Image: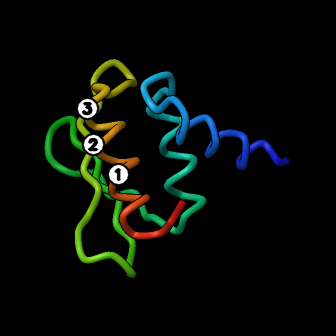
Amino acid sequence: MTKKEKLIEKFKNNPWNLKFWEIEIILKDLWFDRIEAKWSHTKFKNKDLKNDVIIPVHNNDCKDFYKKQTLKILKNNWLI
């Protein structure tokens, strides 16, 4: 199992233990492009998805709600 696969498994099992930079690695590996949005928000866009993933980042981390929401979006779209 590669490091990225382990990181994805960690994200599936316990998303609130990951830092924002780890979620960013997962999203980039799943063909998301990072787009800086207004203020502290970061937008991730995938050409195959209708909606973007928007995560507010403060102190290099995001709230647990956004981690769970990101996981839900990825699972609903069969990405992980």
Mark 2 lies on residue: 55
On screen, residue 47 above or below 13: below
Which one is earlier in the sequence, the residue at label 2 or at label 3? 2
Image coordinates of residue 69 in percent, x first then y, are 29, 44
Q: Secondary structure at mark 3?
A: helix
- State the separation of the CA atoms marked 1 and 3: 11 Å
Q: Nearer the viewer, residue 52 or 34?
A: 52
Q: Left of 27 or right of it: where is 68?
A: left
Which amino acid lies under the numbered mark 3 shown in the image of this protein? Answer: Phe
Which amino acid lies under the numbered mark 1 shown in the image of this protein? Answer: Lys
- The mark total stands at 3
Which one is earlier in the sequence, the residue at label 1 or at label 3? 3
Res 65 label: 3
Identity of the residue drawn at 64% across and 42% down: 9
Mark 1 lies on residue: 72
Q: Nearer the viewer, residue 11 or 58?
A: 11
- State the separation of the CA atoms marked 1 and 2: 13 Å
On screen, residue 46 above or below 7: below
Give the quarter of the image for residue 68: top left
Image coordinates of residue 43 in percent, x first then y, are 28, 54
In front: label 2 or label 3: 3
